[in-house]
């Protein structure tokens, strides 16, 4: 019996779970996939938005600005890379320059600091590779970048280190409330009970709401991306946005915290969105990148991918207790700027919504600090040698592209939340994220997973369920 159940292992669920462990509560997280961070959060742009875009008075505007102010210290405490690189909303006409003034006014109303409009000369001094057609930009100095999957994994891992429990492969099929106790049942008939339930199920949050009789319209929007190798990482230094128009925002061009260049995403509303990339989608990303910048180094493309972004028919975050079932809390339709807002949303949900239902007593043993999952390549030669003497597994490089050691891979297989498949190791250590995309390191990573779990090699998967790498032994 738990005090609180959190449904959904994305960044919102992770931040809420961690916030709950600051109090004397028995809490758990239910995730339908084989690992956490398998939905929206794994294919997020990683942009820490400044807050000029959201309509004043909305929950998006409120939590964006609050989350932006929290993010640097939040990331530092969790050992997650964050960079305050600033954002530029680029105008390509005088009409678009007028829109920049509107965005600046909106941002200032929302409480965003450090906004200013710059001319084309200052824009080119900041970004030498910007298109010659650009005429100015809105400079948001508080914009930043972060690794969305690192943040999600770190929050959940830190929550588990502080006593939270994790149930993976737990797809919720039924929710019942009897005598003030919720019983949540999975498709495999596993049951977990608690006094409160928090719905952070992302794209599935509407479905989860329907299990208690609430109607929340949540749909998916597909976005396709192109990722360039770190060799081109200095092509831009800020996050570059197009000026929003009636036709949309276009794509962005940005550095990542690991010094790749990310282009995208598209925005395609589909009845049944999937994560396949398309020729049309990627062609659109390429054409817009060429509009934004001079000669983008597309020859350094190492992969393309797609993600699904949930959004509600209210066009704002839905953060509220159910009006029909006391003790059931919704965090639904958390679209952009959801990643930026996550720490602030979590604080509000726990203090204001959970706190209305249960007594919040501080957990004096809470430790919010967590070490980075991969770190070896950033150590000095002396530090590397000392660590290898203590643990020889750090002396073996497994991923040559990203310089990730066997010691780091073994560590993430054992720590909270444990990596159980190839993509789980990849998200935690970057093993397989380099130029060869796992071509060399994947077989050995699979061997390490099999040995650590004491299972046959052919049972190891890429990302859980039926994503097997091998069919059997040949000799």
Image: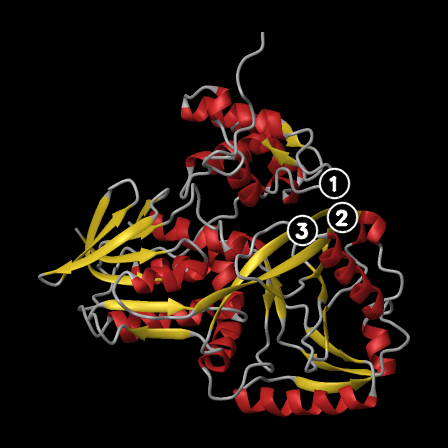
Task: Determine which quarter of the picture holds residue 384.
Answer: top right
Which label's residue is closer to the chain start, 1 or 3? 3
* SS at badge 2: loop
| Label 2: how many Cα within 10 Å (few below 14, some 14–19, many 20+) | many
Marks 2,1: beta carbons within 8 A: yes
* SS at badge 3: loop
Disc sitting over residue 12 in the figure:
none
Percent x, y for residue 233?
77, 55
- What residue appears at the point 65 percent right and 88 percent down from the top-left corner? 104
Percent x, y for residue 105?
62, 92
Which label's residue is closer to the chain start, 2 or 3? 2
| Label 3: how many Cα within 10 Å (few below 14, some 14–19, many 20+) | some
Q: Outermost residue, top direction?
A: 475
- What residue appears at the point 32 percent right and 75 percent down from the top-left corner? 320
Disc sitting over residue 435 in the figure:
1
Q: Which residue is mark 3?
A: 277
Residue 162 in view of the camera: no
Marks 2,3: beta carbons within 8 A: no
Give the Cα distance between marks 2 and 1: 6 Å
Q: How many marks?
A: 3
| Label 1: how many Cα within 10 Å (few below 14, some 14–19, many 20+) | some
Q: Which residue is mark 2?
A: 229
Marks 1,3: beta carbons within 8 A: no
In-front residue for pair 403/55: 55
């Amino acid at each position: 019996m738990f005090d609180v159940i959190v449904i959904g292992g994305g960044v919102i669920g992770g931040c809420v779970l961690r916030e709950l462990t600051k109090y004397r509560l028995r809490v758990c997280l239910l995730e339908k996939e084989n690992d956490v961070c398998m939905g929206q959060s794994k294919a997020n742009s990683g942009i820490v938005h400044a807050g000029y875009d959201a309509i004043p008075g909305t929950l998006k505007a409120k939590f964006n600005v609050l989350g932006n102010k929290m993010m640097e210290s939040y990331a530092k405490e969790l050992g997650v890379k964050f960079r305050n690189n600033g954002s530029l909303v680029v105008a390509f006409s005088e009409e678009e320059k007028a829109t920049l003034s509107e965005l600046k006014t909106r941002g200032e109303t929302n409480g965003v600091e450090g906004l200013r409009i710059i001319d084309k000369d200052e824009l080119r001094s900041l970004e030498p590779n910007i298109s010659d057609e650009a005429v100015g930009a809105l400079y948001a100095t508080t914009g930043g970048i972060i690794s969305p999957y690192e943040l999600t994994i770190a929050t959940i891992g830190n929550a588990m280190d502080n006593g939270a429990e994790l149930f993976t492969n737990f797809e919720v099929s039924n929710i019942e409330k009897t005598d003030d106790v919720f019983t949540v049942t999975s498709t495999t008939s596993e049951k977990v009970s608690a006094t409160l339930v928090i719905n952070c199920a992302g794209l599935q949050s509407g479905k989860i709401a329907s299990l208690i009789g609430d109607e929340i319209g949540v749909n998916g929007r597909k976005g396709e991306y192109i990722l360039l190798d770190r060799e081109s990482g200095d092509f831009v230094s800020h996050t570059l946005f197009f000026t929003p128009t009636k036709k949309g925002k276009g794509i962005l061009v940005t550095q990542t915290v690991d010094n790749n260049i990310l282009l995208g995403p598209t925005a395609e509303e589909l009845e049944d969105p999937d994560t396949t990339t398309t020729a049309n989608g990627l062609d659109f990303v390429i054409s817009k990148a060429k509009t934004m910048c001079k000669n983008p180094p597309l020859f350094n493309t190492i992969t393309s991918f797609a993600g699904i972004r949930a959004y509600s028919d209210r066009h704002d975050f839905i953060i509220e207790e159910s009006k029909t079932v006391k003790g059931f809390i919704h965090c639904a339709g958390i679209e952009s700027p959801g990643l930026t807002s996550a720490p602030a949303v979590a604080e509000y949900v726990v203090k204001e919504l959970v706190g209305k239902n249960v007594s919040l007593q501080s957990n004096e043993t809470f430790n919010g600090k967590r070490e980075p999952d991969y770190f070896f390549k950033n150590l000095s030669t002396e530090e590397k040698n000392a660590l290898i003497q203590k643990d020889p597994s750090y002396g073996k490089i497994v991923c040559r592209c990203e310089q990730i050691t066997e010691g780091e891979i073994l560590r993430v297989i054992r720590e909270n939340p444990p990596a159980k498949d190839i993509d789980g190791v990849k998200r935690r250590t970057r093993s397989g994220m380099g130029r060869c995309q796992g071509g060399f390191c994947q077989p050995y990573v699979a061997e390490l997973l099999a040995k650590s779990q004491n299972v046959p090699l052919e049972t190891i998967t890429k990302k859980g369920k039926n994503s097997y790498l091998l069919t059997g032994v040949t000799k």
